[in-house]
Amino acid sequence: MCEKLKHNSSSDYDNLDTSIVYVEKFNEYGLKICDGGSSNILIEFCPWCGEKLPNSKREKWFDEIEKQLTTATTTDLGIWLNGKMVLDLG
């Protein structure tokens, strides 16, 4: 991994010293959009050395969430997954 990319990126979106955000759960790097939110523009290559960045895990992450939710049970009190309440609706 390029040292300049490591030095100029942060997983802390509020870190004003870096213009590139790293989203660990998706394994993605992006250019921060400084509009008060947490949006970013996905980059697939290092801006300094041109090296291809690791593949995103975003699709796999959401597929797993969707798979888990299909086995969830919904009641008036909440959503249950494997016997544990994951969302309280009460």
Image: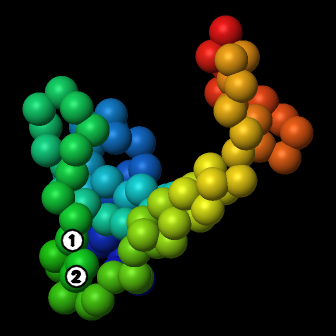
Where residue 89 appears, as percent x and y from the top left, is 63, 16
Q: Quadrant of residue 41?
A: bottom left
Q: With 33 as the anchor, is 28 left or right in this view?
A: right
The residue to which callout 1 is attached is 43
Instruction: Give amino acid for label 2.
Output: Phe
The answer to whether residue 4 is seen in the rendering is yes
Q: Residues within 10 Å of mark 1 (few under 14, many from 20)?
A: some
Q: Residues within 10 Å of mark 2 (few under 14, many from 20)?
A: some
Q: Quadrant of residue 80?
A: top right
Residue 45, label in figure:
2
Q: Residue at x 22, y 44 (%)?
A: 39
Is disc 1 in contact with disc 2, using a CB cutoff of under 8 Å? yes
Residue located at (29% from left, 72% from top): 4
* Residue at horizontal 88 percent and vertical 39 percent from the top: 83
User: Who is closer to the viewer here, 20 or 86?
Assistant: 86
Q: Secondary structure at mark 2?
A: loop
